[in-house]
Amino acid sequence: MKRNYILGIDTSCDDTCIAVISESGELISNVVSSQIDIHSEYGGVVPELAARKHLEVLPTALVKATEPIDGLENIGAVCVTYGPGLVGSLLCGLSFAKGLSFSLSIPIIGVNHLEGHIFSLNIGRNGPRPPYLIAILTGGHTLIVLVKKMGDYRVIGRTLDDAIGEAFDKVARLLGFSYPGGPHIEKAASEADMAVEFPHPMSGRDTYDMSYSGLKTAVMNYVKKIDKKKLKYEVNMIARGFQESAFDTILTRIRRAVDEFKVKRWGIVGGVIANKRLRELANNLAKDTETELYLPEIEFAGDNGAMIALCGAFNLDRGKKDNLGLATYPNLPLCEKPSEKMFRR
Ligand code: KG4
Ligand code: ZN
């Protein structure tokens, strides 16, 4: 029997994601079942509800994802996110993947969700050739990373407090929008003819680290000061001011890193790069600096199983296999895993 296909599963947060790729990396199917309806009324993800929904949806998502390959018999490996993420959510995907690994007698490969996002640039095409620079902008992480080669990463900057996506979600809530806030802020900002001026936290400092909590607080203080009746007329201007400051914070650092590290190719991945204004600003920066920019297709900006399958397949090729003892690791960093550090020494 030929087992030509690889399965990728991600349940790190509030999307139930299963994808199938071929041995050569071609995308066969990509099922993403969103839980927005469940969490939007709470203004953020409720971990227990997210885990319960994953349990309910995983079996049908698997059936749907494996329809084009006529079921499970042709699957040769299962790749699954084991961190970082919400522990209950991670446990659902990991346990499900272990069940598949055991019952089909196929290898299981644990994937780091952040490394998975890096591979979103390789879905259905060749990604940038290393070395390159990449910014990972999600609801839980904000990282600027040098990719020396695939699998060899150096984090040069990170948020010291809130992640950029988290700031979008929190500011959206302040402005009366539901979760997730990013698309609401983007729409409101695009309808504004002016922008409220907000600070650009930690600008002018000699670091690639960032802070988004200060910006969120500045918006909060502004909202508190204005008359509630006036707020509805200012929402769009506030959204635009916040969005411009949030994007300027990351793009000024990328510009500096491009100079310092003589970067020729760079990319942005993660849910926040679904934002068209950020895509436009990033394209402008690439033109200005005469560098090559890589962005994922919008459908692969957010969480998906395809990036997990590609990343897992890459690691499988390099001999990485896990076993049924694999545990979740909710705070898993992109690199600097203690075991890897020890290995390098
Ligand atoms: O990568 P992702 O889907 O999940 C995590 O790994 O966290 O990122 C989700 C984040 C949320 O904070 C969401 O508000 C943000 O991405 N986001 C956006 C947009 N669409 C999603 N932020 C700004 N503009 C958008 N259009
Ligand atoms: Zn993600």
Image (cartoon, rainbow, N blue to C red):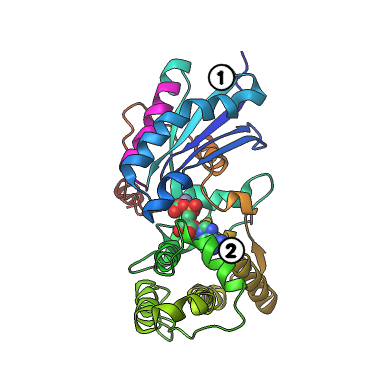
Residue 109 location (% of width, % of height): 45, 33
- The label on residue 255 is none
Stretch of the chain drawn in magenta = 85-100
Q: Is the residue at mark 2 in contact range of ligand 1, meaning its CB lies under 8 Å from it?
A: yes
> Badge 2: how crowded within 10 Å, few (<14), some, or many (20+)?
some
Dominant secondary structure of the magenta stretch?
Answer: helix
Q: Amino acid at mark 2?
A: Asn
The picture places residue 138, in percent across and down from the top left corner, at 46, 58
Which residue is the site of mark 2? 275
Q: Is residue 324 above or below residue 231?
A: above
Question: Which SS class for mark 2?
Answer: loop
Q: CB of residue at label 1: within 8 Å of ligand 2?
A: no
Residue at the image position 43 percent from the left and 78 percent from the top: 229
Asked if 242 appears above or below 128 in the picture, the reply is below
* Residue beneath the point at 47% across and 61% down: 181
Q: Residue at x 63, y 54 (%)?
A: 298
Instruction: Nearest to the eye among marks 2 and 1: give it.
Output: 2
Left or right of 326 on screen, residue 185: right
Residue 272 visible in image: no
Q: Is residue 80 left or right of residue 298?
A: left
**Residue 287, x across and y down, in percent:** 70, 75
Residue 72: image tag: 1
Instruction: Check residue 153 for magenta coloring.
Output: no
In the picture as drawn, the residue positioned furthest to the top comes out as: 1
Return the disc, 2 or 1, that comes first in the chain's sequence: 1
